[in-house]
């Protein structure tokens, strides 16, 4: 078994408007790592186009601590591109992905590393036993999302998990070979495979600031994760198209038998026409919409634009 003293640890921290919390995050991560007998560590903070003083705070930390490395994007590209940049630039034997808001505790790092070493796990993913400080709506929709994506996905994904996880160098190197731009990282890491082991924890309330995932972003995130990891929406659209044909045939049979056997009771037929138009129109629009989403993703990929643009690197 590899010794903890042999490990070089990378910690990847995506940041967007985190000036109120970033120094506390740095202090707690460093305190945890300094108490762990590793060969060394690096903290990679990715400034995802913050509009506050997050970048200034990160530059100040980097000037004081050479273990702090900063990637500054040219604009806001999003949480997943920020995590991707950290994975692609890290040098560690293992990398731990954690958000800056301190809902996920850095104090869990030693336990994650212990599981990695003792169980020879390539991935140690953190599962939320409890989520403090979140509304019933957020808790309900989160549970619904994880179970829906798991049922629809072609790859089984662990439920009640985020991006908070440890990945080893084998997973890091494999991840760097994946060519797609719009990444759903926790799904991709599950898709990669290897040995993946859970660790359980209680998710705390946000230390300061506001959530960077309002409902609109959560919906977009859910759509991306679903369309990139499942063809079942296309199959569902095809099934609904088939069912609409069956219903249409029954409606046609009902109208024809009415004309033959009940000609005096048949009104001009506006009701059946309206029902048929609404039903078939709805099925067609749904099918076109689903296909449009997939085509939109293909369009984004074939443009082959970079996933992110780095404006500045510090301490690399």
Image (cartoon, rainbow, N blue to C red):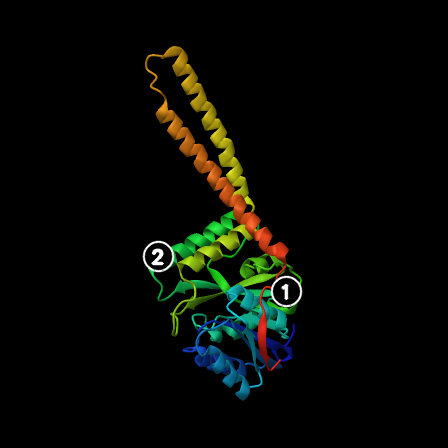
Percent across and percent down for residue 222 are 47, 55
**Image quarter hosting the C terminus:** bottom right
User: Please, is residue 78 above or below residue 18 in the view?
Assistant: above
Instruction: Give the side of residue 20 with respect to residue 195, left or right.
Output: left
Q: Is residue 118 visible?
A: no
Percent across and percent down for residue 69 are 57, 79
Percent across and percent down for residue 295 are 57, 48
Q: CA distance from mark 2 to mark 1?
A: 34 Å
Task: Identify the residue at horizontal 59%, vertical 51% (top origin).
Answer: 298
Residue at the limit of the structure toward the bottom, as seen here: 64
User: Please, is residue 189 above or below residue 229 in the view?
Assistant: below
Percent across and percent down for residue 89 are 62, 72
Q: Is residue 157 visible?
A: yes
Is residue 196 or residue 85 the one in the foreground?
85
**Image quarter hosting the N terminus:** bottom right
Q: Say which residue label 1 marks.
A: 171
Instruction: Rate crowding at label 2 as few (under 14), some (14 to 19) or many (20 or more) other CA atoms within 10 Å.
Output: few
Q: Say which residue label 2 marks.
A: 137
Instruction: Rate crowding at label 1 as few (under 14), some (14 to 19) or many (20 or more) other CA atoms within 10 Å.
Output: many
Task: Identify the residue at horizontal 42%, vertical 31% (top origin).
Answer: 277
Task: Identify the residue at horizontal 58%, vertical 69% (top origin).
Answer: 309
Is residue 236 or residue 72 the one in the foreground?
72
Q: Secondary structure at mark 1?
A: helix
């Amino acid at each position: 078994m590899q010794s903890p003293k042999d490990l070089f640890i990378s910690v990847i921290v995506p940041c967007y408007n985190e000036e109120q919390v970033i120094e506390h995050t740095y202090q707690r991560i460093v305190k945890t790592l300094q108490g762990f007998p590793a060969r060394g560590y690096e903290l990679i903070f990715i400034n995802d186009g913050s509009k506050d003083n997050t970048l200034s705070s990160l530059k100040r930390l980097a000037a004081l601590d050479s273990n702090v490395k900063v990637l500054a994007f040219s604009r806001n590209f999003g949480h997943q591109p920020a995590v991707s940049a950290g994975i692609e630039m890290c040098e560690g034997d293992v990398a731990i992905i954690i958000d800056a808001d301190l809902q996920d505790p850095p104090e869990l790092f030693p336990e994650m590393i212990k599981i990695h070493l003792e169980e020879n796990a390539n991935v140690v993913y953190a599962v939320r036993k409890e989520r403090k400080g979140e509304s019933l709506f957020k808790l309900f929709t989160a549970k619904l999302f994880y179970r829906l994506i798991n049922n629809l996905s072609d790859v089984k994904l662990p439920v009640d998990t985020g991006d908070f996880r440890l990945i080893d160098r084998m997973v890091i190197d494999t991840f760097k070979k994946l060519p797609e731009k719009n990444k759903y990282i926790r799904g991709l890491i599950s898709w990669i495979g290897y040995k993946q082991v859970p660790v359980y924890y209680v998710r705390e309330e946000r230390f300061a600031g506001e959530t960077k995932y309002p409902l609109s972003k959560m919906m977009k995130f859910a759509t991306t994760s679903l369309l990139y990891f499942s063809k079942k929406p296309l199959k569902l659209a095809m099934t609904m198209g088939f069912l609409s044909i069956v219903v249409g045939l029954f409606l046609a049979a009902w109208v024809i038998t009415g004309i033959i056997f009940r000609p005096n009771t048949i009104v001009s037929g506006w009701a059946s026409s309206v029902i048929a138009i609404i039903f078939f129109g709805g099925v067609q629009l749904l099918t076109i919409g689903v296909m449009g989403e997939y085509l939109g993703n293909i369009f984004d990929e074939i443009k082959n634009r970079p996933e992110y643009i780095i404006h500045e690197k510090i301490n690399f």
